[in-house]
Amino acid sequence: MTILRFLSNLPRPTSLLRVNVVDRPNSGEAWLQTQSVNTWPGTVARIITGVSAFTALIVWFFWRSWKSLERAERDPRYLRRRLLLMGVFYVAGAVLGIEQVATRKQPVQSLIGLPIALCFAWFWLRSASRVKVPPREPQ
């Protein structure tokens, strides 16, 4: 009961609900009562618009990922290009980290994750080299 009283005495942030602590006599319990607060209709519209836009962005992202996966299944050149891109990404990160340590902009301890990055780079580049690409047909 004392915790609820403490929480009810804290400064309230602007919210959609107001909370009041009500003591029930002879029971030793405290209940929370809430009252709705009139909000500006634009606030609700902004919330709905924001959530809808974010949902549309997530759906678009997954749709593009699905299409990319389907294309990688059909086109071995595209698959190899994607795997090479991932490998080069990890190699570039490793080179950048080594360069930062060599120029003393970062401490040597920042290279602790270098073996993991190199393993990822090796995995992606090895996977790209194992993709069988048929020769191009003359036009």
Image: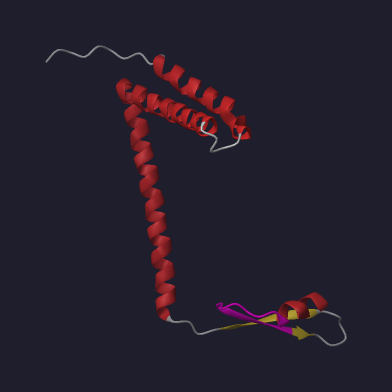
* Percent coordinates x, y for residue 23 in the rendering: 79, 85
Seen from the viewer's position, the closer of residues 136 and 63 is: 136
Question: Does 108 appear in magenta?
Answer: no
x%, y% of residue 88? 41, 26
- Residue 87's quadrant in the figure? top left
105 left or right, relative to 75: right
Q: Quadrant of residue 45?
A: bottom left
Query: Quadrant of the image for the C terminus?
Result: top left
Q: Residue furthest front?
A: 103
As drawn, 107 above or below 56 = above
- Camera-side residue of 57 and 88: 88
Q: Residue at x 41, y 55 (%)?
A: 55
> Which residue is situated farthest in the bottom direction here?
25
> Which residue is located at x 47 percent, y 32 percent?
96
The residue segment tinted magenta is 9-21
Relative vertical location of residue 127 with respect to residue 46 in this rendering, above or below: above
Residue at image position (38%, 59%) is 53
Magenta stretch: includes residue 11: yes
Left or right of 132? Residue 122 is: right
Q: Position of residue 54 (x, y in %)?
A: 41, 57
Q: Is residue 131 above or below residue 86?
A: above
Q: How many marks?
A: 0
Residue 1 seen in this snapshot? no
In this rendering, does residue 125 appear at all? yes
Identity of the residue drawn at 77% across and 80% down? 5
124 to 42, vertically: above or below: above
What is the residue that sits farthest to the left in this orientation?
139
Residue 137: percent from left, percent from top: 18, 13
- Residue 119 vs residue 102, the one in the foreground: 102
Q: Residue 4's image quarter?
A: bottom right
